[in-house]
Image (cartoon, rainbow, N blue to C red):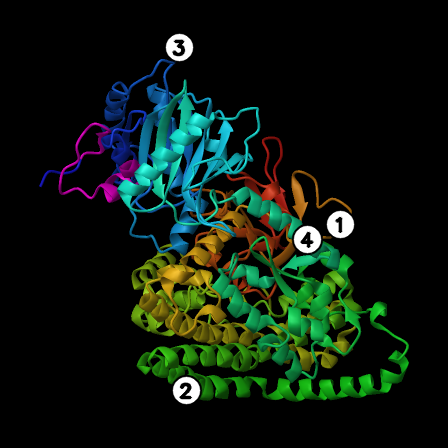
Amino acid sequence: MTRPRSIYGCDEALPEHLDGRRHLGQKAMGLRWLWEQGYSVPAFFTISTEVCAAYHASSRRLPPGVLDEVMEQASRLIRGESTGPPRVAVRSGAPESMPGALETVLGVPMTEPALESAIGAVLDSWSGPPAVAYRRAFQLDQVVGTGVTVQTLVETECAGVLFSAVDTEDGPAELRIEYVPGSGKQVVDGSRNPIEIRVPRSEQELTNRPPVSGAIEPSQIRQLCTVALEIESKLGYPVDLEWGYSDGLLYLFQVGRISTQGGSDGAATTREEELRRIRRLEQEGPWLRHALHESVPTPTPLTWSVLEQLMSGSGGFGNLYRMLGFEPSQRVRQQGFLALMGGRIYANPGRQAELFAPWPLQYDVTAMISDDAGLDVGPSMIDVDKIDSLFLFRIPWLAWKAMSSRRRIVRMTRSAASDFDQFVQGEYANRLQQYQAEFEQGENQVRMETLHRLCEFVLHQAAPRLLLPGLLGGHAWNRLRTKLQQWLGEDTGDRVSRELICDIPLDHSPLVAFVREQSAGEDDAALLQEYGHRCFEEMELSAPRWRETPDRFQELVNDWHSTNTAQPAGNTRVPPAQERLEQALAEAGVHSLASRVTNTLREARQLLVYREHGRHFLMQGFAAIRQCVEAIARQTELGAAIYFLELSELEVGLDGDRVRSKIEQRRKRWQALQELRLPVILGAPIADGETGSRERTTGRSLSLGIDRGTVHDLESAEDGPSEGSILLCSSLSPKLLAHLPGAKAIIAEQGGYLSHVALVARALGKPVIIVRDACDQYRCGEDVTVNADLGEVYRHTSDSEASVT
């Protein structure tokens, strides 16, 4: 069998055995069909998807001979009657539709450098964040690359799109035309509001008159509609056409199957509407990006519906606070304290303080603006707006409630570790196995009921018991820090309190386990058995677990082996905790106070370990939920699209075809919101004062150490970081862990001292510092020193050097 060529012209027949859609892309095959049917299509040629794969496999270089063939094909294109230099349009076209994710370049001169640059831009977009996110969300890993179509550019007087069947609220479907004067690209990408014309399919007469300026003629409208219905009849399904008029002639640039109602995806409109919604929510006060952002940056609808149950005042998180003697307010029980804003998870401090009802407490908003870790600590201020005329009469009852809650917390702290171990080894493991067995053996009705019972158990009943020890450990550490700040001063007390827990063990951290396995010679299969239910962004249900992708897991282990030869840092940076505590108090002349916080230090160190333990076992529950959802996705043939439904919509008799329109609308909204860049804090004034000079910037240290390297922005760079990079990111996402062994340090915009990445970084001796708006301050390739011991980042310039001692 002859090997397929890398490039095919529009007038060249394809081999019979060739899968044209896979080899050239969906759009190119649509164009070829239009050409073969005799419609007016500007001449073109298409570069195959295999060239895209080879381009990325060879450090972004076109395979040998391809550029010569491009220039040969370009010389054959029809150049039209333009009096200026000939130009072409260079368009993407993957085997599967990826709207808005890939690049198009218009007005490219037909010179070798210009064509090479434009083709490279389209191929580069295949590995860009929008395309990568789209393929991950829809599990398109089997698609090798995008095709590239180079087409004669026709200068149009007006251009746009036509949808041959758009449903209306009060009548039958109609044809809808959206266009702008000039190029139609502005309609497709949503950068300009189009002129809209609606035409009944039966009459083909205008139902609204276009403006006089820039209007197309009625005869052109009739021609457009006639052509569209003719193509629809030939293909057997409603279509969308990209078209243009040039010197009175109708040209067709693309044909596709309509997958959603309502015309163009309206990404720009979606973002504008969301920004208006955010402005309304900001009236409640500031919103802070929640720590969940680290594990699930942009949750799919199914994941968000699960997290809402887990984190609501009437769900698992509310039950956790009830265990401690609090009673979340009615508002928190009904509305929660979290919200999706721009597709990201934000917390409202005013609502979150109501988890501690009936006490009239509030967070120190001013302090949180300068230190976004404020939500890690309970509210510390009285909210006078919550004090009514009966408050004085409630004081005795509140005092009794406070004493009762304190006794309960003391009692729970003593038994938290043993209760946790007993629960996860007994009831928790048994119930998960029971639900999974019932789901596998059951029919439709039983399966759906079992899934909802599993979610009720994991999210409402088990989660509070799994998270309780870690919460108590954080409570003990905050008490310790408060005391040390009183005795040693705010800055010194804060620093010492952090040092006292920097060496706590991380027995259930997967990547620390990889280091342990490397030194102890443990079997990789045993690691997969223990950590197979984990993954990066593991609270996102659509993310495959490591046991589902064992090859990826093995690559991860191998990467760690090749880049990490050091042992976990342990307590090598500081003396043992008790000794360090006594030393710090002695230096301040208050050594006698050590005995007053010894027990608190012991409780904090013992129970903070369970933050990672709790996460490890909670993820077993999430993996069980995902396993059930995946089975339903296969049964309904929805595949990865099922994650754009909500948990309550997974019901008996779920009709995949019936919900596809809803899924597509949500997917487009989810995708559109990815492009919004939102700050860590919404609805609050910028803190006064500068964070530092251009060369030296101050921040908040999460892991001590000093190192120098080159900045690599994980969110904007197209290539992965090289070994020895300083990683720059918006938050401490678990995805950082894949790059942590070879990194020298991390600069992030947001993250907590007790976050998973910070814990692992301290175990491995990697400096981590939080700097407000860091992604706006630093660029890839800059030479910086991270001095987390002093809480500073220093930018090296040609005429300055950093002092790192």
| Quadrant where the N terminus is found in the figure | top left
Point 61% across, 37% down: residue: 801
Q: Is residue 54 above or below residue 668?
A: above
Front in this rendered view, residue 169 or 780 = 169
Q: Is residue 137 above or below residue 165?
A: below
Q: Position of residue 595 (x, y in %)?
A: 72, 81
**Would you call the spot at circle 2 few (<14 residues within 10 Å), some (14-19), or many (20 or more)?**
few
54 left or right of 564 in image: left
* Residue designated by label 2: 430
Front in this rendered view, residue 743 or 452 = 452
Element type at mark 1 = loop
Magenta range is 5-30
Element type at mark 4 = strand
Point 49% across, 43% down: residue: 716
Q: Amino acid at mark 3?
A: Thr
Q: Are marks 3 and 2 in contact (CB under 8 Å)?
A: no
Residue 83: which disc?
Answer: 3
Front in this rendered view, residue 98 or 479 = 98
Q: Amino acid at mark 2?
A: Asn
Gap in Å between the C-alphas at discs 3 and 4? 53 Å
* Residue designated by label 4: 682
* Residue designated by label 1: 685
129 left or right of 579 in image: left
Quarter of the figure with residue 312: bottom right
Gap in Å between the C-alphas at discs 3 and 2? 78 Å
| Number of numbered tags placed on the structure image | 4
Quarter of the figure with residue 309: bottom right
Q: Residue furthest left?
A: 1
